Image (cartoon, rainbow, N blue to C red):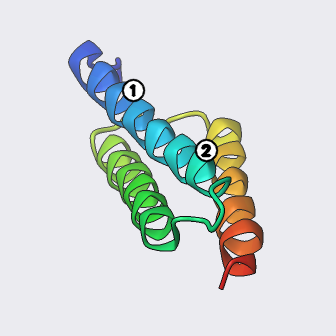
Amino acid sequence: MPHDPALVAEVRGWLSKAGKDLATAQYELQADPPFSEDIVFHSQQAAEKHVSQTWGAIQSGYVPSVPGLVQVWFKFANLICLDIISIF
């Protein structure tokens, strides 16, 4: 099935926004003390955007790059499991 350019652009746009949420969470980790509530919020938003757009893309027949998704999810796991948990 050919990719719908509008769908691809929408998915990429939302994934870009998710990346900015993740970058914000990582930046907030550097504060002393870290902004715990904001870190959790931005991490949740990034994960929700990724899951939502990936699921929508799969349902529409556009399957994103699996290696790219794996890389993104490892970044989330590293941020959430190692960095965020260490501040509580």
Residue positioned 69% across, 79% down in the render: 85
Spatial CA span between label 1 and label 2: 12 Å
Q: Quadrant of the N terminus?
A: top left
Q: Mark 2 highlights which residue? A: 69
Left or right side of 29 for 49: left
Which badge, 1 or 2, comes first in the chain's sequence?
Answer: 1
Image point (64%, 41%), residue name: 66
The image quadrant that residue 87 belongs to is bottom right
Q: What residue is drawn where x is 71% and y is 44%? A: 71
- Dots 1, 2 in contact, CB < 8 A: no
Q: Give the residue pinned by disc 1.
A: 12
Q: Furthest-top residue in view?
A: 5
Q: Is residue 68 above or below residue 77?
A: above
Front in this rendered view, residue 77 or 25: 25
Determine the residue located farthest toward the front in the rendered image.
Answer: 32
Q: Nearer the viewer, residue 87 or 9?
A: 87
Kind of residue sitting beneath label 2: Leu
- One can see residue 29 in this view: yes
Q: Residue furthest bottom?
A: 88
At which x and y percent is residue 74? 72, 55
Give the camera-side residue of 4 and 53: 53
Q: Position of residue 44 (x, y in %)?
A: 42, 65
Percent across and percent down for residue 19 are: 50, 38
Label 1: state its secondary structure: helix
Query: Residue 49: image x %, image y %?
Result: 36, 51
Q: Amino acid at mark 1?
A: Arg
